[in-house]
Image: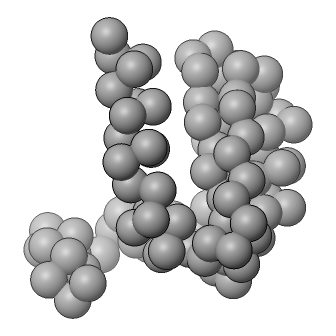
Amino acid sequence: MAAGARHALFSGYYGWMDDDLALVKPWEFDLSAISKPVELWTGGDDLVVPSSHGEWLHGKIAHSKMFFVPGEGHMSLAKNKREEIISHALAYLN
């Protein structure tokens, strides 16, 4: 995880800062304008991004699909469902 963080921040912290600012200021686009399919994955034990936020996004993005995974947290969801998430993403490219 430390190696991933070093790599992610190699060019600076601006992406991370943008993510944090998105929590406290309006986004610069209208979620209802998204016309592409979107998958929202959320874990029932996520203490970083609660599933209620995923549900809120799902209500705002017309073509979204919600995947709620009980018992998964913020990091464990990505680790334990990695193959399934990647498989879904690749299906959109085919």
Q: Is residue 74 above or below residue 28?
A: below
62 left or right, relative to 7: right
Q: Image quadrant for the N terminus?
A: bottom left
Tell me what residue is drawn at x 56 percent, y 74 percent.
74
Q: Is residue 24 above or below residue 28?
A: below
Res 25 quadrant in image: bottom right
Q: Is residue 18 visible?
A: no
> What x and y, as percent, mark residue 49?
68, 71
Camera-side residue: 6 or 47? Answer: 47
As drawn, the residue found furthest toward the bottom would be 2
> What x and y, as percent, mark residue 81?
46, 56
70 left or right, relative to 8: right
Res 73 quadrant in image: bottom right
44 left or right, relative to 81: right
Tell me what residue is drawn at x 33 percent, y 26 percent.
90
> What x and y, as percent, mark residue 27?
66, 48
As drawn, the residue found furthest toward the top would be 94
Tell me what residue is drawn at x 85 percent, y 61 percent.
52
Q: Image quadrant for the C terminus?
A: top left
